[in-house]
Image (cartoon, rainbow, N blue to C red):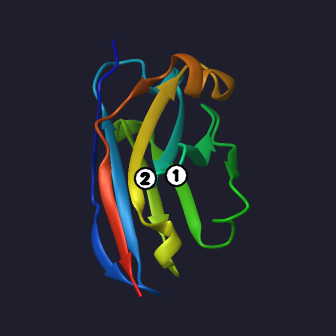
């Protein structure tokens, strides 16, 4: 069973940058698709970015050009670099793992989340 631990959240001013990390336990990280999701207060959880086992990426329209998802299989880690942050990016950010991207939300393994707060 994969376990995920996120880190790197915090408070930043609008226009600033933050980097999130998600470390996965277990030896099957290389075979997992990964994703970053977020949930703001009073709103539904939404996908931010996903990355396949082979490194193909996909982004929500709201973060394209500002966020970058990447993975380091040697370190069992997926990253989310967030630039040009906006107050509307404020949310709890979660990483998820599943055999394929389409299974991330329904059956994926989830981390505990890390808070990102962007002040105006």
Q: Residue 79 carries which label?
A: 2
The local crowd at label 1, few if under 14, some if 14 to 19, many if 20 or more residues have their Cα within 10 Å, is many
Residue at the spot 52% in from the left edge and 82% down from the top edge: 84
Say which residue appears at 51% left-offset and 45% top-offset: 37
Q: Residue at x 46, y 49 (%)?
A: 39
Comparing 34 with 70, the one in front is: 34
Position of 64 compared to 47: left or right?
A: right
Q: Residue 94: percent from the left, percent from the top?
A: 40, 43
x and y, in percent, of residue 109 in the image: 42, 22
Residue 67 vertical position relative to residue 109 in the rendered view, above or below? below
Position of residue 21 measured from the top left corner of the image (x, y, whole percent): 34, 51
Q: How far apart are marks 2 and 1 (CA)?
A: 5 Å
Between discs 2 and 1, the one toward the N terminus = 1
What is the residue that sits farthest to the top in this orientation?
A: 1
Judged left or right of residue 39, residue 21 is left
Residue 12: percent from left, percent from top: 32, 79
Q: Does 116 sit left or right of 7 as displayed?
A: right
Above or below 93: residue 10: below
Q: Is mark 1 on a helix, strand or loop?
A: strand
Q: In this view, does 104 lie above or below 62?
A: above
Asked if the residue under mark 1 is in contact with the one under mark 2, i.e. CB atoms within 8 Å, the reply is yes
Judging by the rendered image, the residue that carries numbered circle 1 is 70
Residue at left offset 60%, top offset 73%: 66
């Amino acid at each position: 069973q994969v376990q995920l631990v996120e880190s790197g959240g915090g408070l930043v001013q609008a226009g600033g940058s933050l980097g999130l990390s998600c470390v996965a336990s277990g030896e099957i990280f290389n075979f997992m698709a990964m994703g970053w999701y977020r949930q703001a207060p009073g709103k539904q959880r939404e996908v931010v970015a996903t990355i396949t086992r082979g490194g193909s990426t996909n982004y929500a329209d709201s973060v394209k050009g500002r966020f970058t998802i990447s993975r380091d299989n040697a370190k069992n880690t997926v990253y989310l670099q967030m630039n040009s942050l906006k107050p509307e990016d404020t949310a709890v950010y979660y990483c998820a793992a599943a055999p394929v991207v389409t299974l991330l939300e329904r059956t994926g393994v989830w981390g505990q989340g890390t808070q990102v707060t962007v002040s105006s």
